[in-house]
Image: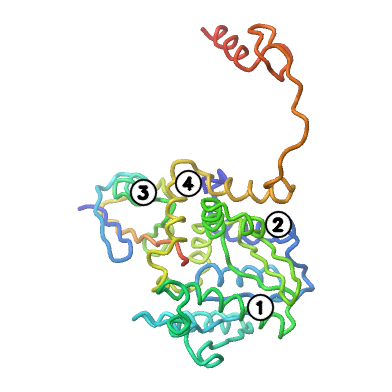
């Protein structure tokens, strides 16, 4: 099993055991532009992703 | 929060944000506890969080929602109104609502088409209408000050755009407080020192339900492009956005912006080692470095 990152309508898969920050970089997502949640709770960039995790990424940029 | 070199748990983060907001309100002399505040509320994370913070701090703050008539296939305006109303009801707050179509006969997208402003996008008309209506309501209903939820990313993006274009007039006007005068209400931005990411975290941690969908017309906007560029910079150099904006404010407050420095230059004399001009006593910076390198090696 792997870790799933979900940002709006896009899904990314990464290997478990890596830190969230590294996972974001691997998926070419700018960490500053998102907040990550697991089961509705915010997690920090140094959190180690566990097998089967589903991480919802909340885009923070708004404006027009 | 790498820019502050600070990591807080949820409880302390939720206390830190209002404490800092209060600090900025006082630092920039935005308003006092006896003044009546009108908060411009859009249903988004920043404006609802601002309203929440001001109430938590004990200020007298009512809300103003402008129904713009933007649908975009996602009922954007209806949804944002519902969330604003829900927040007001849950906290027993007063929310003034102005429906632009009812007031002026046309929604924002239609007004944009009719007026041919904004190169096919309604953003210019939207901005103009919002500024006009926010000021009208604040003035007509006797509010002392109008507060908006602009965060540091909003302000840094505007600053970036105005700097790229060297729009001196706009640069000189930009700031956390626009003073009242000539029929214009005082406008303040109490969240201007918080990153957009911090405000999103605050809204989530406080359980504030906000409209997550972007305005359908915001896609591809210049402001979002600038924000993305600044985030790339922030990623490589944590604190870059903060430094860019705060140092601009400091320079402006000190009157150093676009003022030629006429102070006499520090007198130069010859370095005691190489003889090149230096303002330092004894050795110049280069020679001091070389001396230091010799000691290490």
Q: CA distance from mark 2 to mark 4?
A: 24 Å
Residue where numbered disc 4 is placed: B234
Residue B33 in picture, x, y percent from top left: 77, 70
Q: Secondary structure at mark 4?
A: helix
As drawn, the label of residue B135 is: 1
Q: What subunit carries mark 3?
A: A
Q: Which mark is residue B23?
A: 2
Of mark 4 and mark 1, the one earlier in the sequence is: 1
| Secondary structure found at label 3 | helix
Residue at 47%, 86% (x, y): give it: B107
- Judged from the image, the secondary structure of the residue bearing numbered disc 2 is helix
Between B67 and B82, the one nearer to me in the picture: B67
Q: Would residue B280 appear left or right of B105 to someone viewing this image?
A: right
Protein chain holding label 1? B
Answer few, some or many: residues within 10 Å of disc 3's Cα (few below 14, many 20 plus, some between 14 and 19): many
Q: Does residue B223 lie above or below A27 as drawn? A: below
Query: Subunit of mark 4?
Result: B
Same-chain check, marks 4 and 1: yes
Disc 3 vs disc 2: Cβ atoms closer than 8 Å? no
* Label located before the other in sequence (2 or 1): 2
User: Which residue does the image show at 70% across and 57% down from the upper left?
Assistant: B23
Q: Which is more foreground, mark 2 or mark 1?
A: 1
Question: Image check: B231 left or right of B147?
Answer: left
Q: Position of residue B124 (x, y in %)?
A: 50, 72
Give the alpha-carbon distance from disc 4 to disc 1, as whole Å.
34 Å
Q: Nearer the viewer, mark 2 or mark 4?
A: 4
Residues beneath discs 4 and 3 located on the same chain: no
Say which of marks 3 and 2 sits in front: 2
Q: Position of residue B241 (x, y in %)?
A: 53, 49
- Residue that badge 3 annotates: A20
Relative height, residue A37 to residue B288 (above, below): below
Question: For the residues tagged 2 and 4, is the chain the same?
Answer: yes
């Amino acid at each position: 099993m792997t870790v799933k990152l979900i940002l709006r309508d896009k899904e990314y898969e990464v290997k478990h055991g890596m830190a969230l920050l590294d996972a974001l970089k691997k998926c070419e997502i700018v960490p500053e532009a998102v907040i990550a949640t697991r089961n509705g709770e915010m997690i920090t960039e140094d959190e180690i992703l566990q097998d089967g995790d589903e991480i919802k990424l909340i885009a923070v940029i708004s404006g027009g | 929060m790498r820019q502050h070199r600070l990591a807080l748990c949820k409880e302390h983060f939720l206390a830190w944000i209002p404490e800092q907001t209060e600090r900025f309100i006082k630092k920039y002399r935005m308003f006092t506890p006896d003044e009546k505040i009108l908060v411009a509320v859009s249903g988004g994370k920043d404006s609802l969080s601002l309203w929440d913070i001001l109430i938590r701090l004990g200020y007298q703050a009512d809300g103003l929602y402008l129904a713009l008539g933007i649908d975009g296939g996602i009922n954007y305006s209806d949804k944002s109104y519902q969330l604003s109303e829900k927040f007001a009801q849950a906290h027993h707050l007063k929310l003034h609502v102005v429906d632009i179509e009812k007031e002026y006969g046309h929604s924002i997208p239609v007004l944009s088409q009719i007026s041919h402003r904004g190169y096919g996008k309604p953003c210019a008309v939207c901005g103009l209408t919002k500024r006009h209506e926010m000021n009208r309501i604040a003035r007509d209903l006797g509010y002392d000050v109008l507060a908006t939820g602009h965060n540091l990313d909003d302000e840094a993006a505007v600053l970036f755009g105005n700097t790229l274009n060297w729009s001196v007039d706009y640069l000189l006007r930009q700031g956390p407080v626009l003073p009242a005068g000539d029929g214009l209400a005082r406008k303040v931005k109490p969240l201007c020192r918080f990153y957009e990411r911090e405000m999103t975290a605050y809204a989530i941690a406080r359980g504030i339900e906000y409209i997550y969908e972007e305005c359908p017309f915001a896609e591809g906007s210049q402001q979002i492009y600038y924000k993305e560029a600044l985030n790339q910079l922030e990623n490589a150099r944590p604190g870059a956005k903060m430094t860019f904006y705060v140092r601009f404010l400091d320079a402006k407050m000190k009157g150093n912006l676009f003022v030629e420095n006429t102070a006499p230059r520090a007198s130069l004399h010859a370095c005691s080692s190489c003889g090149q001009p230096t303002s330092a006593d004894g050795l110049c910076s280069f020679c001091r470095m070389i001396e230091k390198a010799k000691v290490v090696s």
